[in-house]
Amino acid sequence: MRAVIQRVTHASCTVEGIVTGKIDQGLLVLVGIEEIDTEEDMKWLAQKIVNLRIFSDENGLMNKSVQDIAGGILLISQFTLFAQTKKGNRPSFIRAGKPDKARPMYDEMGKYLSGLLEKEVQMGIFGGDMKIDLRNDGPVTIIMNTQDKDNF
């Protein structure tokens, strides 16, 4: 799994004019699921996301997690995180998980994150034409990859 995690002051997802998820201060998480990803990968990534200390404390140091600030999470599926651009100009997405694998894992990640956060995680629509509005705070953007845990 790959994730792009952005600290935001607010974020929302709209599909066909309907807001499917909206948060104030918290994390916008773009997640891509690969064919080889497992439930263990999903749980590892979710734990990391909830516990990342990237929010400022009273001294202006990044010492607080999204849990610590009672923030929200907006989880968006994004298969394009697995774009391969080595050959030609049209990206290949062959490594991205097929919908029959990726959709249940995305849904499960939303539920798992909700349990860890102890509040409902807001979500986009898997496979939908989503419009994401956000204000990146900092900006703080973290990239994680469960297949390369030692380097992230």
Image: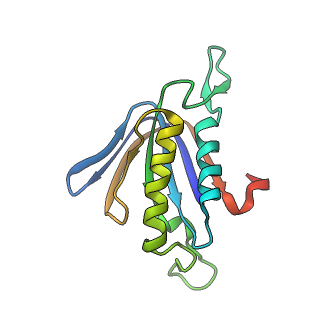
State the residue at coordinates (51%, 35%). 117
- The residue positioned 65% from the left and 50% from the top of the image is 44
Where residue 3 sits, quadrant-wise, is bottom right
* Colouring rule applied to residues: rainbow
- Location of residue 140 in the rendering, given as x and y in whole percent from the top left corner: 59, 39
* Vertical position of residue 24 compared to residue 37: above or below: above
- Judged left or right of residue 134, residue 47 is right
Q: Residue at x 62, y 43 (%)?
A: 47
Along the viewing direction, whichever of 108 and 85 lies nearer the viewer = 108
Residue ranking furthest to the right: 150
Is residue 28 placed above or below 117 in the rendered structure? Answer: below
Q: Residue 134 at what x, y percent from top left?
A: 40, 42
* Residue nearest the observer in this picture, 84 or 75: 75
Residue furthest toward the bottom? 88
* Residue, far left: 17
Q: Is residue 73 found left or right of 19 in the rendered image?
A: right
Tell which of 46 and 137 is nearer to you.
Answer: 46
Looking at the rendered structure, the number of numbered marks drawn on it comes to: 0
Q: x, y percentage for residue 41?
A: 64, 58
Q: Quadrant of residue 24?
A: top left
Name the residue: 46% across, 58% down.
Answer: 106
